[in-house]
Amino acid sequence: MKSLVMFFKLVRWPNLVFILLTQLLFEYCILRPLLLKTGIQAGVGGVAFLLVATAYILVAAAGYIINDYFDVPIDIINKPDKVFITNGMSKELALRIYVTINLLAITLGWYASIILQDNSAVLFIITCVVLLYFYSATLKKQFLIGNLLVSAISASALPVLSCMALKVDWMSPAVDGSPELIHLSWLTYLYTGFAFVISFSREMIKDLEDVEGDKQYGGRTVPIVLGISASHRIIAGALLTLIIVLVCLLSTIGLKILTLYAIALIIIPLTIILWKLFNAKEKIDYGHLSSNIKKVMLAGILSMLFYKFFML
């Protein structure tokens, strides 16, 4: 029982629930209803969707394992209470679990691709597996590229569903010229962009939180290279851009309940995060900011429910 609890902590089970919730809401609140309005049968059936969603959860879990595998010395400094590999689980066992989980994820993606007669699923999954390995092994400690890479991987959970549903490589607003499909394309852009910016900001904040350990082991993260103040400005620029885009979009939608929801649970919290960011100095301050960003991310995910019940 203790080993099982440790495993779930190692793979950050709350984050895996986030991924599943994101894909479930996008699939059943946006993707399927819009396709139904066009008379197109959803390209991702129930079984295929379950395979892809499970594969994404497995890839993320494996990513956390390999990340901790390479970061044991750094984590002993940054977060000694959250070191599970070498403290209850051997590195050899962790590596075997990592390989097994990834092979299972690729198999599920391959089977989903066979069902759909489209390779999008397995290509997305293999790409994520490869990139997460190199991110954990080397790129995480490099200047900016690691932040951008892991943010893109996190945001890819939505476009993979749209690509499979429409069997296209790129979500173009001109797909078939249908208003519903154009709407789907832009919603995919919107939520993917939201996920990318939020993930990027949180990764930057985590770098600020872990700067001491990263510095001792040769890290070249943004806070180490450019300094704390410059990192604050980069995060602030990303979040401020997100706020401006959201305000502009809400002004065109005209749905008061969604506007009030977004202002109360996304825009105001982001503004508070911005204010607290420039007052953050200690490790605990950045930990609180990271937790608050996750709450905003959850609010953004749940906003998909408004499209299902009020707009579609």
Image (cartoon, helix red, strand yellow):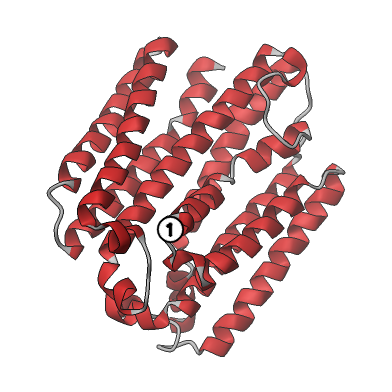
Mark 1 lies on a secondary structure that is helix
Task: Please name the residue shown 52% across and 43% down the image.
Answer: 22
Task: Please name the residue shown 71% across and 67% down the image.
Answer: 104
The kind of residue on which mark 1 rests is Pro
Q: Quadrant of the C terminus?
A: top right
* Nearest the eye: 217 or 253: 217
Task: Please name the residue shown 48% across and 87% down the image.
Answer: 89
* Nearest the eye: 135 or 257: 135
Residue at which label 1 appears: 14
* Nearest the eye: 294 or 152: 152
Decide if residue 93 is on the left or right side of residue 295.
right
Q: Please determine whether, in this image, residue 41 is positioned above or below residue 158.
A: above
Structural crowding at the residue carrying mark 1, measured as other residues with C-alpha within 10 Å and reported as few (<14), some (14–19) or many (≥20): few
- Residue positioned most to the front: 225
Total marks drawn? 1
Decide if residue 111 is on the left or right side of residue 250.
right
Q: Please determine whether, in this image, residue 250 is positioned above or below residue 272.
A: above
Q: Please determine whether, in this image, residue 169 is positioned above or below residue 72.
A: above
x%, y% of residue 91? 52, 87
Decide if residue 198 is on the left or right side of residue 176.
left
x%, y% of residue 214? 33, 72
x%, y% of residue 25? 54, 37
Q: Please determine whether, in this image, residue 48 is positioned above or below residue 88.
A: above
Task: Please name the residue shown 75% across and 54% down the image.
Answer: 122
x%, y% of residue 86? 44, 89
